[in-house]
Image: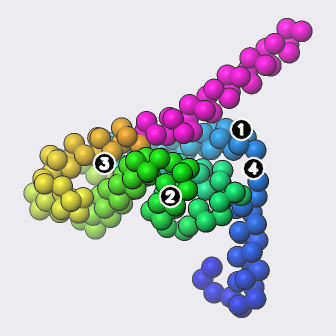
Amino acid sequence: MVTGAPRLQTAIRQVVRRTLTAKRDPAKLIADVADMRERLAAHHRAQSGWDVKHRRGGLVDVEFITQYLQLRWAHDHPEILRTNLGQALEQAGALGLLTLADADTLHRAWQLWSSVQQTLRLTFEGDFREKALTDRVRQLLAEAAQCGDFSDLKTIMTIRADEVSALYRDLIDGPARTLRHAQQAAEEQKNES
């Protein structure tokens, strides 16, 4: 909230908290999250690996994983509800909802994507083309991402995207696909009866 009477702010915060900590059907939640991510991917296709928001393994996937964990576990662990994505990931690791290594992987990817995205927004205008980057912008990107040079940055970006993609498949896409197959098999069996 930006502004409002203190009592109104308190009332709104309580409604939001009740909504976020409501008990959810885990199967429905995972199916809904996977479906929403696929719909988003269909409408926002990354044009290159530099579209760090929409590329597979990019910022959106980190956000979907984090928000899924918050919605899935907030009923039992309301302390996972953090508006800062990095803090939410740290909390998920501390609570054992992710391994500490996976939480760290997602946190590092989030930091990388955020740094690259912010630097590009500040230094590049118009349609992005890697060939149009000046040496100074390449240097700034590498520095913002705490990489040795531009080539190292590109390598790290590929590694982070692959790591996040694997975690997304393990935590959301794989379980959702398994659930869909089980539902289809049950429906086919019902229709055969």
Q: Residue 94: x, y in percent?
A: 50, 58
Q: Amino acid at mark 3?
A: Trp
Residue beneath disc 2: 94
Considering only order in the chain, which callout, 3 or 4, is on the residue closer to the N terminus? 4
Residue beneath disc 3: 50
Q: Residue furthest right?
A: 193
Q: Residue 102: x, y in percent?
A: 43, 46
- Using the numbered discs, state the Cα–Cα distance from disc 4 to disc 1 in whole angstroms: 9 Å
Label 2 Cα neighbours within 10 Å, binned few <14 / some 14-19 / many ≥20: some
State the residue at coordinates (28%, 46%).
157
Which is closer to the viewer, label 4 or label 2? Answer: 2
Residue beneath disc 1: 27
Q: Amino acid at mark 4?
A: Arg
Along the horizontal axis of the image, is 170 left or right of 124?
Answer: right
Which is closer to the viewer, label 1 or label 3? Answer: 1
Q: Which residues are drawn in magenta?
A: 165-193
In front: 53, or 7? 7
- Using the numbered discs, state the Cα–Cα distance from disc 2 to disc 1 in whole angstroms: 24 Å
Quadrant of residue 164 in the image? top left
Question: Badges 1 and 3: C-beta atoms under 8 Å apart?
Answer: no
Quadrant of residue 107 in the image? bottom left
Q: Amino acid at mark 1?
A: Ala
Which mark, residue 24?
4
State the residue at coordinates (47%, 60%).
90
Q: Amino acid at mark 2?
A: Ala
Along the horizontal axis of the image, is 84 left or right of 191?
Answer: left
Q: Secondary structure at mark 3?
A: loop
Question: Badges 2 and 3: C-beta atoms under 8 Å apart?
Answer: no
